[in-house]
Image (cartoon, rainbow, N blue to C red):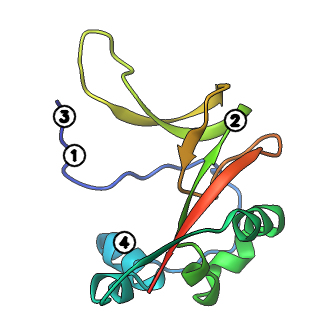
Amino acid sequence: MSAYYGGRAECHIRKVPLPIVHTDFISMYPTVFALLGMWDLVTAQSISVERCTAEAQRQLDTASTDAYFGQQVWRELNWFGEIEPDGDIVPIRAQYDPSNDALNIGVNQFATSQPFCFDSLCGQGDQQTRISATGFGT
């Protein structure tokens, strides 16, 4: 078993000038909660669960980094999906140390013929095959 004191941070591009957006990473989880409009789900009388495979695929096909610097697109991300990654680079929760039962998250090249739950647009590599997507609404 393992525990984390704080969030995770990575740097994939170093020493290259790029445009930035000031972000308060101390409040990252509450910020994402607010951007996704999750309070609407928390306070809803009921929650609908609907298949949204076509909408999720459209988001994946048209995703651009620039769009996520604005607030509007975040409310469209209340969905989970299953994909069959074929060598794509995706975040994976797995046991990386055989002497320890802890599950950690790493960003790895991954392939499987079984559907894999994927809740993010951060996959890289070849176009991913979307199997199905489920969205949540009030």
Q: Is 80 on the left or on the right of 31, as rendered? A: right
Q: Which residue is mark 1?
A: 4
Q: What residue appears at the point 57 percent right and 80 percent down from the top-left corner?
A: 74
- Mark 4 and mark 2 in contact? Answer it, CB < 8 Å: no
Q: Quadrant of the N terminus?
A: top left
Q: Which residue is mark 2?
A: 85
Where residue 82 sits: x, y (%)?
A: 60, 47
Front-most of 32 and 18?
32
Question: In the image, what residue type sits under mark 4?
Answer: Met
Give the mark nearest the N terminus, 2 or 3.
3
Q: Which residue is mark 4?
A: 28
Secondary structure beneath dot 4 equals helix
Label 1, label 4: how far apart the Cα atoms are: 15 Å
Secondary structure beneath dot 2 equals loop
- Mark 4 and mark 3 in contact? Answer it, CB < 8 Å: no
Give the mark nearest the N terminus, 1 or 4.
1
Q: Is 136 on the left or on the right of 95, as rendered? A: right
Label 2, label 1: how far apart the Cα atoms are: 28 Å
Q: What residue appears at the point 39 percent right and 20 percent down from the top-left corner?
A: 96
Q: Is 54 on the left or on the right of 111, as rendered? A: right
Label 2, label 3: how far apart the Cα atoms are: 27 Å
Q: Residues within 10 Å of mark 2 (few under 14, many from 20)?
A: many
Q: Which residue is mark 3?
A: 2
- In terms of image quadrants, where is residue 45? bottom left
Q: What residue appears at the point 71 percent right and 36 percent down from the top-left corner?
A: 88
